[in-house]
Image (cartoon, coloured by chain):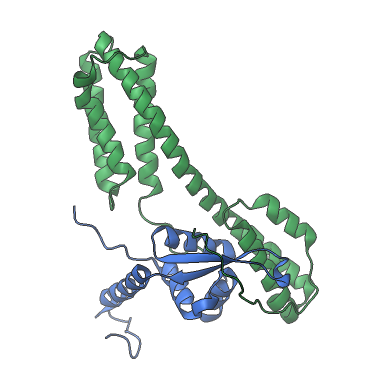
Amino acid sequence: MAKQPDLPGAFEQLVMLAVAGLGDGAYGMTVRRAIEERTGRGISLGAVYATLDRLEAKGHTTSVAAPGSEARGGRAKRFFRLTAPGVRALNEGIQAMDRMREGVAGIPRPAGAGI
Amino acid sequence: MTSTRVTSHASPPATTTFHAPRTERLMVMLLPAPYRDELIGDLLEEARTVVTPRVGERAARRWLWGQLLRSTPHMLRLHLRKELTMRNEKLWGMVLILVMGSLQAWDSGVLRAPAYIAAMVVLAITIGVVALLFAERMGMRFIASAVAFALLFGARILSPIPLPELGLVGFVIVMILVVAPGLMAAKHSGPQGPTSAA
């Protein structure tokens, strides 16, 4: 049986885009805030961590632990980063979405979209 | 999770003296182990450095409670998912033992009946169909199918091996244990989690 492309879901794509955009500063709090600020949608940190865990299990992200600061009550921090397969999967997901809405009435592609 | 540690990543400085020791204790009690420390740290950091300066301590406490209540189901589900995967592995060990026992029962003649063969055929087909329906990747579902078919076709080949007597009860347990992990595995790693997880 041919292997199906593993396209990330909508929320996974948001998390992956936030991680990619934040670069070296991507951890739970910054990812959550980035999504909330850009989408205007209130999300819970638990949802972000559950998604990051799923993405890591799929090999789309990796993470490293860092010591906590005073503001965190000394609690550890975990930084996330997209892997090369993660970047590929994210691009495939976005392109699949673009292809799906191609020519659908009332849902135009954003200006400058496409290759 | 990768266990590499980075040495320093500065957080924004604590701009308030916001403290919520009771909520923090409750978070430690309620939240399961995976990411607990990171999640509590993130929430405290955001409450201290972002939320309190913007809306005050009282509202920050409410925000913290809201985050805790909304995060807990996600964290519990994450915990259960990891636990279920581990339990599946243990369950498979039991399945294999009981399958061997049931083969011995077959050899003793107790279960050498048309009903047994029919049940095994139905079982094998059911697990095979479930596996095919949910199989995006091979994995636990493939093993579920393999065990079912091994049970069906291997019975006669392995029957001379001396094994402990389990009888009909063993057969019933085998039936349940062979079907359950297949279904659990299919449910566990079928279509991906919710896309609107918030």
**Quarter residue A14 falls in:** bottom left
* Residue B117 shown left or right of residue B102 in the figure: left
Residues A64 and B129: in front is: A64
Residue A11 seen by the camera: yes
Q: Position of residue B169 (x, y in %)?
A: 39, 16
Residue at horizontal 56 percent and vertical 51 percent from the top: B76
Where is A110 relative to B149, above or below? below
Residue at left offset 25%, top offset 26%: B151
Q: Quadrant of residue A29?
A: bottom right
Query: Which residue corresponds to the image point at 33% horizontal and 75% vertical from the top-left?
Result: A91
Measured from the top left, where is residue B161 in percent x and y? 26, 15
Q: Where B159 falls versus A98 (above or below)?
A: above
Count the marks: how many?
A: 0
Left or right, B43 with reference to B56: left
The answer to which of B94 and B68 lies nearer the viewer is B94
Most distant residue in the bottom direction: A112
- Residue placed farthest to the front in the image? B7
Q: Position of residue A20 (x, y in %)?
A: 45, 77
User: Looking at the image, can residue A40 be seen?
Assistant: no
Residue A18, percent from left and from top:
48, 76
Q: Nearer the viewer, residue B24 or B37?
A: B37
Figure colour of chain B:
green
Q: Color of chain A here?
A: blue
